[in-house]
Amino acid sequence: MENIKKHNFGAGPCILPQSVLEEAASAVVNWNNIDLSILEVSHRSPEFESVISRTGLLVRELLKVPEDYTVLFMQGGASTQFSMIPQSFLKTKGLYLDTGYFAQKAIKEALFFGDTEIIASSADKNYNYIPDIQSHHTNADYLHITSNNTIEGTEIFNWPDMGVPLICDMSSDIFSREIRIRDFDLIYAGAQKNMGPAGMTMVIVKNKLLDSIDKPLPSMSDYRVYRDNQSLYNTPPVFSIYVSMLNLLWLKNNGGVSGIEKQNIKKAKLLYAEIDRNTLFRGNAAIAHRSRMNVTFQAVEPTHEQEFLDFAAKRGMIGIKGYRTVGGFRASLYNALSLQSVQALVKTMQEFEILRQPKPVGAESEIVY
Amino acid sequence: MENIKKHNFGAGPCILPQSVLEEAASAVVNWNNIDLSILEVSHRSPEFESVISRTGLLVRELLKVPEDYTVLFMQGGASTQFSMIPQSFLKTKGLYLDTGYFAQKAIKEALFFGDTEIIASSADKNYNYIPDIQSHHTNADYLHITSNNTIEGTEIFNWPDMGVPLICDMSSDIFSREIRIRDFDLIYAGAQKNMGPAGMTMVIVKNKLLDSIDKPLPSMSDYRVYRDNQSLYNTPPVFSIYVSMLNLLWLKNNGGVSGIEKQNIKKAKLLYAEIDRNTLFRGNAAIAHRSRMNVTFQAVEPTHEQEFLDFAAKRGMIGIKGYRTVGGFRASLYNALSLQSVQALVKTMQEFEILRQPKPVGAESEIVY
């Protein structure tokens, strides 16, 4: 068991495995005993080239990426992808599934580049569910979806097939569960959840989609430039890539994606069960669409909200305040968050319930502290 | 004196002060004793907000940035700026000074956005000098220059005044010498030389220039979005900003920009003097335009090139191989490189000279080893 400093339920930049942090810290002073810091190494050195290629191979192995897909490491965050995707692929129309805050951000950027259509939205219920996709559109360049909605706490479990290339923002659930890459034409993910430190975005793209780009583009907005230069056209975010490599090695040594998925299911079930059981709390998301990564819930009694935040903070729990537009609570259960941390949160919720709803004398002893 | 591991003359990502690396490493495990890694901290936390605002204040203090200029921290490297500048400011024509590899990259990207004019070029002499700017153009939106040419080893010491906004790529000499911010309308710099780890770009821009943007732009290509959100519109490169803060504090405590400039002049003079004295080497750049940051030189006798690289490597010197298109040697003397490292390189050059040009018996003892 890894040493728990605090129970970090933050939504991102978020918890990373302790062993990864320790190795990264050591590399900041002296990397691999080459008497240089990882921060001082040229991105053109053989040492760093082996880091970036090994990171790519780990991605391919862990996600079973087929040969005809390319893995790219880019700067700029998922927000940059919101623009690059329509800039690269939108010719007649881009379809978008509107499942919340980040889906809307993607839609907003697409409007600069062409015609978009929102094929379904869950805005009517404050984005607490994933809408059904009923109609079929074929006269479009792609469908863009957000697999996990970090703020709203919903997650897509059935991938739509609209007969157009499927593009997915997987920033907050990549590497958390098994996926079939062939279901997608382009996946992108900001590193700062299950991959590594903020400052890097990974793209997995089908070569056929890349080859459909038929116009010149500014270099840093051109996926082909990243592909043709093995993500080394310009100086890449060296440290973010290095720590991602360490983190993917940790994942590989801890059961891989299928192993971590089992753990993530276990953690999410435990917390949702407590939310459903505990009389003081209720979940936000429709049960069938509950995210395993970001568990959103609220206090039945609004006055309990700040009280519970304080109560939990005293027990070493941080990052459970809900996003400002949603309120309530959000506990993010990313890969590196241990089952022990979820157990500690559940126990805290139980203790809080006892505190607020005193049982008859003698009944307290039923709860194990 | 800081402990020297290797003499790192690499052009970038490059040497950082040892004390900065040690503090950064400590923060990767447990930052400021808050029981969290700097990599795990939310960019919306008060702790990180104080880092980014303190970094901004240090930039303002060290460079004496006037009130009507804004300091921005962005992702994407200087290469992204090559596009963002014409995308934002090019309406009728952009003027460019062609002083080498990176200047040309900037010109290439501008062509996507409009009309450009190269007002002067030193391509005729393999970019070994800074061309005079003689003509006056007023019907243009800006003049773009590259203050230090990392690959060619030249540096601009007299800023042109063309009566149009002056935009400067200062990636490889920012914080190395005193500048008057008022001479410029926009300065940008990738962090990975004198500021911090790769993954961040700083922009200092005159508000008047920002206000001249009169069209909607994709969010991540819009300087106004960064300004209006204090560089926190999306997840910033947290670690790069944090280490930059540490490095700027180091600079402040080590004489500031004027103090480091004196050191940099001393280091550059010492090395150029040896290049000029030593019969086996010759400098690349025109003397008046020699860069203090990147000293380029070559072996008079081509067969000596690889021999000297091996000779220097055995003495702990790395990163002195010249860029592949230029050949020869390049010793980068960034802020964190100590005078001792330059002295060690000079001594190595002297030893190499003795080895290749044996003196009469008895004369060797003149050289102190």
Image (cartoon, coloured by chain):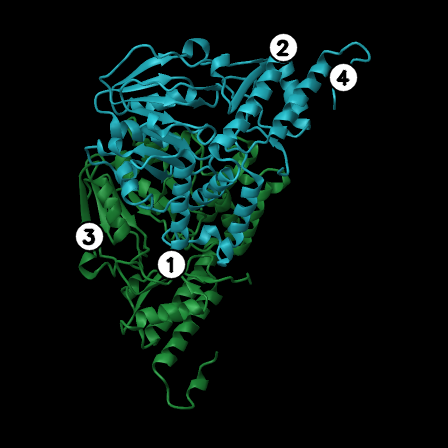
Chain colours: A green, B cyan
Judging from the image, mark 3 belongs to the subunit labelled: A
Determine whether the residue tagged by mark 2 lies in a helix, strand or loop.
Answer: loop
- Tell me the kind of residue under disc 3: Ala
Badge number at residue A120: 3
Query: Residue B46, how many percent across, how many down?
Result: 38, 54
Q: Residues within 10 Å of mark 4 (few under 14, many from 20)?
A: few
> Is there a contact, CB below 8 Å, between mark 3 and mark 1?
no
Which numbered mark, 4 or 2, is in the foreground of this view? 4
Determine whether the residue tagged by mark 4 lies in a helix, strand or loop.
Answer: helix
Query: Residue B196, how many percent across, how many down?
Result: 47, 38
Query: Residue B25, how many percent across, how many down?
Result: 54, 47
Residue holding disc 2: B301
Label 2, label 3: how far apart the Cα atoms are: 71 Å
Nearest the viewer among B17 and A202 is B17
Which numbered mark, 2 or 3, is in the foreground of this view? 2
Nearest the viewer among B137 and A248 is B137
Badge number at residue A293: 1
Which numbered mark, 1 or 4, is in the foreground of this view? 4
Residue found at the very far right of the displayed protein: B362
Which numbered mark, 3 or 1, is in the foreground of this view? 1
Q: Residues within 10 Å of mark 2 (few under 14, many from 20)?
A: few
Judging from the image, mark 2 belongs to the subunit labelled: B
Q: Relative to A109, say whether A306 is above or below.
A: below
Nearest the viewer among B353 and A27 is B353
Residue holding disc 4: B366
Residue at 38 percent across and 76 percent down: it is A352
Callouts 4 and 3 on one subunit: no
Residue at 41 percent across and 53 percent down: it is B47
Query: Residue A80, how many percent across, how many down?
Result: 32, 40
> Is there a contact, CB below 8 Å, between mark 2 and mark 3?
no
> Is there a contact, CB below 8 Å, between mark 4 and mark 3?
no
